Image: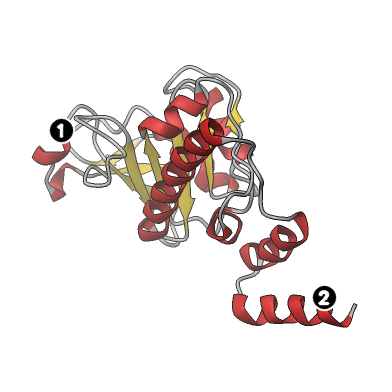
Amino acid sequence: MAKAGLVVAMEGNASARIPGEEKIAITPSQIPYDMRKLDDILIVGFDEKVLLGKHKPSFEAKAHIAVYKARSDVGGVIHTHSPFASALSCVGGRIPPLLEGQTVFLGGDIGTTPYALEGTAEIGANAAQALSERDGTMLANHGTICCGKNLDEALRNAILLEKLAMIYITAKTIGEIIPIPADITKLQNQYYKSPANITELMNQYYKSRRQS
């Protein structure tokens, strides 16, 4: 996260679901990334009680837990303060489908949740709702939260969301945004909802277009 420029100092947080249990492993609060060690990670129950660890869990533990409760398929959650996506979140931005990977990996257009104070149940509820059909969203005047079946996927999605925000802002300064055609994103969304061979899906699509 830090190497990718998604966080600095003590910003952001990451967690992983403990399989088969209502528990997560989550990063600590107020410890710089370059000083963190394995035993600084905490184990926290879905009831927010610390079960193992000597530090305070991330301030956004509520948001992480809310996402896990809402999405049984999620195994990793990452919250960042990446600059371009954070900038868009301050204007209630929405990123239409710009690149093919956006719908395939994130689920489609990316919006901004309503504003809520950091560390509250409200921000967790907003995040869980936004991620019900997406694997990434922007948090108003705050940053981003992304998920995946594991931490690797969650990180990939967080990096992709920041890349999309940068491209969107840059493209807006050049001219009118031209999103990917809706029929293509509809097809890509099938892959997002039920992963299959995306090449086969696209071949079927172009075959049907030629026949019509």
- Tell me what residue is drawn at x 27 percent, y 46 percent: 4
- Tell me what residue is drawn at x 27 percent, y 40 percent: 5
Numbered disc 1: secondary structure: loop
**Residue 135 seen:** yes
**Residue 62 seen:** no
Pick the front one: 128 or 34: 34
Percent across and percent down for residue 73 are 54, 59
Which quadrant does the C terminus fall into? bottom right
Residue where numbered disc 2 is placed: 209
Percent across and percent down for residue 169 are 49, 33
Residue where numbered disc 1 is placed: 32
- The way the protein has been coloured in the rendering is secondary structure
Pick the front one: 94 or 18: 94
86 is higher (above) or lower (below) than 186 = above
Answer with the quarter of the image where residue 46 lies. Answer: top left
- Mark 1 or 2, closer to the camera: 2
Percent across and percent down for residue 144 are 45, 35
In the rendered structure, which amino acid carries the disc numbered 1?
A: Pro
Which quadrant does the N terminus fall into? top left
Badge 2 crowding class, 10 Å Cα cut-off, few under 14, some 14 to 19, many 20 or more, is few
Distance between mark 1 and mark 2 Cα atoms: 53 Å
- Tell me what residue is drawn at x 59 percent, y 41 percent: 110
